[in-house]
Image: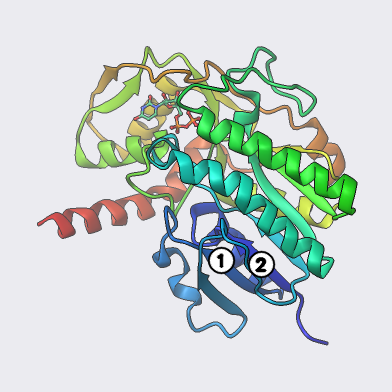
Amino acid sequence: MSRQRALVTGGAGFLGSHLCDALLAEGWSVVVVDNLLTGRRANLERLRNDAAFEFIEKDICEPFDVGRVDYVFHFASPASPVDYTLHGIPTLKVGSLGTFHALDVAFKYGAKYLVSSTSECYGDPLEHPQKETYWGNVNSIGPRSVYDEAKRFTEAVTMAYHRYHKVDTRIVRIFNTYGPRMQLNDGRVVPNFMKQALRGEDLTVYGDGSQTRSFCYVSDEIDGFMRLAKSSEHLPVNIGNPNEFTILECAQQVLRVTESKSKISYEALPQDDPKQRRPDITKARQLLGWEPKIQLAEGLRMSLDYFKKAVEEETTRSK
Ligand code: UDP
């Protein structure tokens, strides 16, 4: 019997590339479609000679067809606040047009479908922790709206294809995730703090650092995706680590793990920066038997070699 074939849009990105590894390890053949706007070839380098792996450089905002697939994993989108602010219109387009095209592929081949959504659907949440049933508190015209509304629209299109076309869809709401293959300069808090700590620069805490996030290590996150992919739940499921930290605590953990003597400096808080974020993962626990295993200090230690190498490479390049 021939292998099952999966399409991963955005497979050259941080989460997409880890997902490719997990699918290949389970015996899938994988085709990635990515326009490399924020994804990187380096994330897929080790798969280049794998006969079960294929990479197509293409923008999914145009209709596309990669032949028969059994599963569509739609992960294409800029995802860090710095990236989606820089690429605001492409972010809106990939969440809207790109989502239609990914769903059209699933519809055409009768493939299953899983899409990456986000805790940004909850905006600056007034309910804490956030359950999947919470509708959110989102500014539809602020600087983050290019991402938040793109992803909310992604969810709407996905549910519509499920309801009208009977596509077998799943939606994962992803909370802050970190680990190897994050871009050093994507502006997110973990790569920023790791880079600053390893270079002996000040760690830039935005605002007073009392805002909270809940950080999930990448291997836990991918395990959640794989379990959800095998389930038949169509409504959104939160996959994130419910251990909540202030950003100041996160900075202190990075200083400890890197044994850095860097100081902390304070900078302006970006507009609409959510004050708190913490997933309620009751649904994932009950439905998927999933919960994260790796806590922040351990995950930062597991990421240290990657960030050290990335900082060294950047230093060499700039010489
Ligand atoms: N942040 C910070 N310093 C940095 C980068 C980010 O204090 O150098 C804060 C940011 O203001 C936010 C949190 O860390 O409150 C998480 O930011 P990130 O960009 O990682 O993702 P978000 O959860 O906001 O999408």
- Residue 226 is marked as none
Vertical arrangement, residue 300 with respect to residue 27, above or below: above
- Could you tell me residue 184's position as x and y percent? 34, 47
Residue at 73% x, 56% y: name it. Answer: 103
Element carrying mark 1: strand
Residue at 60% x, 37% y: name it. Answer: 150
Q: Is residue 240 visible?
A: no
- Could you tell me residue 231's position as x and y percent? 85, 52
Q: Nearer the viewer, residue 129 or 271?
A: 271
Residue at 62% x, 67% y: name it. Answer: 64
Q: Is residue 115 visible?
A: yes
- Residue 7 is marked as 2
Q: Residues within 10 Å of mark 2 (few under 14, many from 20)?
A: many
**Residue sticking out furthest to the left:** 319
- Residue 33 is marked as 1
- Could you tell me residue 222's position as x and y percent? 64, 52
Kindly check if marks 1 and 2 are in contact, taking CB atoms under 8 A apart as contact. yes
Q: Give the amino acid at mark 2.
A: Leu
Q: How is the image coloured?
A: rainbow
Residue at 71% x, 62% y: name it. Answer: 72
| Ligand 1 has an atom within 8 Å of the beta carbon of the residue at disc 1 | no
| Ligand 1 has an atom within 8 Å of the beta carbon of the residue at disc 2 | no
Q: Quadrant of the C terminus?
A: bottom left
